[in-house]
Image: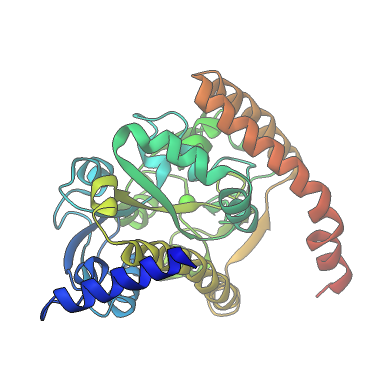
Amino acid sequence: MRKACVALLYLALIGCGGGDKVAPADGEQSQQRFEWKLVTSWPKNFPGLGLAPEHFAEAVERMSNGRLKIKVYGAGQLVPALEVFDAVSQGTAEVGHSGAYYWKGKIPASPFFGAVPFGLNAQEMNAWLHYGGGLELWRELYEPFNLVPFAGGNTGVQMAGWFNREINSIADIKGLKMRIPGLGGEVFTRAGGISVNLPGGELYTSMQTGVIDATEWVGPYNDLAFGFYQVAKYYYYPGWHEPGPALELIVNKQALEALPDDLQAIVETAARAINQDMLDEYTARNNAALVELVEKHGVQVRKLPDDVLAEFQRLSADVIAELAAEDPLTKRIADSMRAFAAQSSAYHGISEEAYYNARGK
Ligand code: CA
């Protein structure tokens, strides 16, 4: 009772003594305006990947009633595609949208937050990040770089890629020159292939001129837009190398902490929204694009032979074990993801998988 009286007295005092300036500190802070720069690794407005940061900026501006404005720069407009991480780390831009596996040279564990061959699919990746300890590990990994990562989208299981010859056994991989980056590329090389990394814009011409024999890109939606059906006959699945590739939204730590609590919540909520939205869009558009590729363009859709997938899986386990041996944090991340995958397989076998089998076509 006495405490309540003191509190009332205090409120009365500040109410009377404040003159015109009646807004408390929080109220003043809520009027403060911020302008951020967002750098990306994608061409401006690139379908799917490049639209996510645009949606993020729009959502933040609307939810904050214009108090946090974010200007989005495509790859090369403010910094080159692969300098997003450094630019946000150093504060050249406050926020970035990219893929964690691009930073493998700097951070060996980064592919675990992008794509690991035979790793988690999109549903599992989101579950591991948000309810399985993954995001905490990701934040620990990026902490020394002054960055706070958020999940920033997912394409869902990709396709194994476009091939200009049939793959009937592991012998057909030998000497095959394929654009396949990241850990998948390492596995492909160990299987006897020649992996190369080329930017998306060069893939069509490289296939057309025979510089490469095969290429992976994303999935039907993005691949149809690039016209790969004109330069390769066979479209193989499944995307063993990128089963649930996550994109990242990275925020400069000081910039995030300088925001009042409500704007921080808006950033977090908008990130969560674009993360789910990208998967929704890819899921819908991939379905429609695959129908068009097959029915309109006569693309031959083929499954990679089981023995080829088994060999890729065996080699992937080696690559991941070597990665996990790099340092204790990488090992903790690898162990956490592996344990989550094992649990998920047990339940998904009797839920998602059993249901798909029961539903049939
Ligand atoms: Ca890909």
Instruction: Provide residue 117's location: percent of width, then percent of height.
Output: 59, 40
Q: Quadrant of residue 37?
A: bottom left
Q: Nearer the viewer, residue 140 or 322?
A: 140
| Identity of the residue drawn at 57% across and 78% down | 288
Task: From this view, report whether residue 234 is shown above or below residue 286.
Answer: above
Q: Is residue 98 left or right of residue 313?
A: left
Q: Residue furthest front?
A: 2
Q: What is the tally of numbered marks visible in this picture?
A: 0
User: Is any atom of residue 196 visible in this view?
Assistant: yes
| Identity of the residue drawn at 86% across and 62% down | 354
Q: Nearer the viewer, residue 77 or 70?
A: 70
Instruction: Provide residue 128's location: percent of width, then percent of height.
Output: 61, 48
| Identity of the residue drawn at 67% across and 36% down | 338
Q: Nearer the viewer, residue 275 or 233?
A: 275
Indicate the colouring scheme.
Answer: rainbow
User: Is any atom of residue 49 visible in this view?
Assistant: no
Instruction: Provide residue 120's location: percent of width, then percent of height.
Output: 63, 47
| Identity of the residue drawn at 19% across and 73% down | 31
Instruction: Provide residue 319's location: percent of width, then percent of height.
Output: 57, 26
Task: From this view, report whether residue 228 is shown above or below residue 63.
Answer: above
Q: Quadrant of residue 19?
A: bottom left
Q: Is residue 100 left or right of residue 22?
A: right
Task: Give the position of the C terminus as an image quadrant.
Answer: bottom right
Q: Is residue 169 left or right of residue 32?
A: right
Q: Residue furthest left?
A: 20
